[in-house]
Amino acid sequence: MDKIISVSLGLLLVVLIAFVSVFSYGAFVEKAYRESLSGTYSYTCTITTDSLLSNVTFFIPVPADPSGNSPVVTGFSSRDITGIPAGWDVTLYDTGKATLVKITTSAITPPAGTDLSMINMSADLASGSAIDTRDPLNNSALFRPVREIVPVPCAPDHVQGNPLCYHYMTSLYADYRAAAGASVTINATLAGRNTWKIFEPGFNEYTTAVSLKLTGAQQGWSTMSGRLTDHIGMYDTPIQA
C-alpha cells in the first residue's frame, strides 16, 4: 500500500511539475510577444512627369480603414509625410467612402538638364496596436474606395506564410495643363507589418499598391489599378495578429 501511495504521489508530482512548466512557458511566450509586438505602416506616393504641368490639382487616395482613419491620414494632418515640395498646398478630404489628399500647385517642372520630375512622398508610421494583416479590406488601411476586387494568382516571391492576392480598382482626380504627349505616372504603396521577438524575430504583413499612367492634359476622374497581398509571414503567435 505504501508503495502504491508513493508511486501515486510521484506521478502526481510529475504531472504538477509538467503543468507548471507548460503554464510558465506559455506565460513567458505571451509576455515576450506582447512586450515586443510593434505595428508599422510604410507609405510611399511617387508622382513622375516628363513635361511641364501647370495649374495642377490632384485628389489622390490616402490609405485608410473603412472608418477613414489610419496613421497615414494622421501623418498628412500633422505634416509628418516627407518629400512634399515647398509651396504645395496639401489638404485632406473625407468623402465618406474614401480619404483623399488634395494637392494643388502652380506647376511641376522637370529640373533643368533632366527629362523627368519625380516627387516622392513617404513615411514610416507606428500603428499603436497590432495591424490586421489577414483581413485588411475590412479592418486595416487600403486605398479606397476599393472596387471590383477579385482574387488573382500570387507571384512566387513570398517565402513565408500562405499569401492571398487580389486585384482591385480605385479612383484618382487630376486637373492640369500639359502638352499633348506629356506623360505622368502616379504610384502609391503601403505595407502594414507586425514584428515581435519570441526567442527569435517574427513578422506578418500585408502590402498594397496602386498605379496610373496619364497622357496629355487632364480634367476629371481616372481609374487606378490596385493590387493587395495579405497573409504574408507567420501566424502561430499566442495572440493572432
Image (cartoon, rainbow, N blue to C red):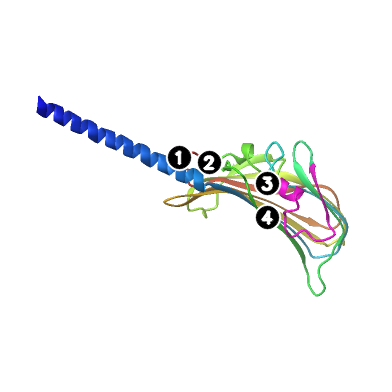
Magenta region: which residues?
71-93
Give how far apart the Cα atoms at labels 3 and 2 are. 18 Å
Sequence order check: which comes first, mark 3 or mark 2? 3
Q: Which residue is mark 4?
A: 123
Crowding at mark 3 (Cα within 10 Å: few <14, some 14-19, many 20+):
many
Q: What secondary structure is found at the residue carrying circle 3? A: helix
Residue beneath disc 3: 71
Report the residue marked by disc 2: 241
Whether tag 2 and tag 1 are in contact, CB under 8 A, the answer is no
Total marks in image: 4
Mark 3 is on which residue type?
Pro
Which of the two residues, 114 or 234, is positioned nearer the viewer here?
A: 234
> In the rendered image, which residue does mark 1 sit on?
238
Nearer-the-camera pick, 119 or 155: 119
Amino acid type at image mark 4: Ala
Whether 15 is among the magenta residues is: no
